[in-house]
């Protein structure tokens, strides 16, 4: 399943969700579309302000892979990982475990590095 993040004056990011990784989380995300969220940065992690999605940990991971997309239950946030976070220089370590829900379909570090704190983006089904 593909969804897009519409980012004003930058471009869209396509996410490929995989419901075999965290089926309940992916289902709740799809049911909540479309929705808007503010953007925050933490190292090379982009994460949203709280979203309308509320769900618990589901196969949560404390270390993720490059270009993984996660859902962070404590903050009700969607997270995009494109490099190290402040917790670890060698691995991509979220602040706390996330439900990995898919991958960034069109990973472009130049595009991702143009995103800044405070942007308001829209998540939509493609």
Image: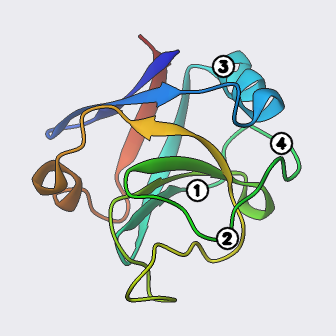
First-in-chain label (1 vs 3): 3
List the residue tagged with mark 2.
62
How far apart are the alpha carbons under marks 2 and 4?
19 Å
Look at the image and tell me in which quarter the C terminus lies.
top left
Q: x and y percent of residue 3 in the render?
A: 46, 21
Q: Say which residue appears at 72% left-offset and 52% top-offset.
A: 76
Left or right of 122? Residue 73 is: right
Callout 3 crowding tier (Cα within 10 Å): few <14, some 14–19, many ≥20: some
Total count of labels:
4
Q: Nearer the viewer, mark 1 or mark 3?
A: 3
Q: x and y percent of residue 26 in the render?
A: 70, 28
Left or right of 57? Residue 62 is: left
How far apart are the alpha carbons under marks 1 and 3?
18 Å
Image marks 1 and 4: residues in contact by CB distance under 8 Å: no
Query: In the depicted view, which residue is nearer to us: 6 or 61?
Result: 61
First-in-chain label (3 vs 2): 3
Q: Nearer the viewer, mark 2 or mark 1?
A: 2
Q: Nearer the viewer, mark 1 or mark 4?
A: 4
The circle drawn on residue 30 is 3
| Residue 86 sits above or below residue 6 on the image | below
Q: Say which residue appears at 19% left-offset and 61% top-offset.
A: 113
List the residue tagged with mark 1.
49
Q: Secondary structure at mark 1?
A: loop
List the residue tagged with mark 4.
54
How far apart are the alpha carbons under marks 1 and 4?
13 Å
Q: Say which residue appears at 52% left-offset and 89% top-offset.
A: 87
């Amino acid at each position: 399943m593909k969804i897009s993040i519409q980012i004003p004056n930058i471009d869209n990011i396509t996410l490929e969700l995989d419901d075999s990784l965290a089926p309940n989380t992916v289902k709740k995300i799809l049911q909540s579309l479309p929705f808007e969220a503010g953007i925050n940065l933490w190292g090379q992690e982009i994460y949203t302000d709280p979203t309308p999605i509320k769900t618990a940990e589901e196969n949560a991971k404390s270390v993720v892979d490059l270009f993984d997309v996660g859902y962070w239950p404590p903050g009700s946030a969607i997270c995009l990982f494109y490099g190290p976070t402040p917790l670890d220089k060698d691995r991509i370590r979220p602040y706390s475990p996330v439900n990995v829900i898919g991958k960034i379909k069109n990973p472009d570090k130049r595009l991702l590095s143009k995103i800044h704190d405070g942007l308001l983006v829209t998540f939509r089904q493609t």
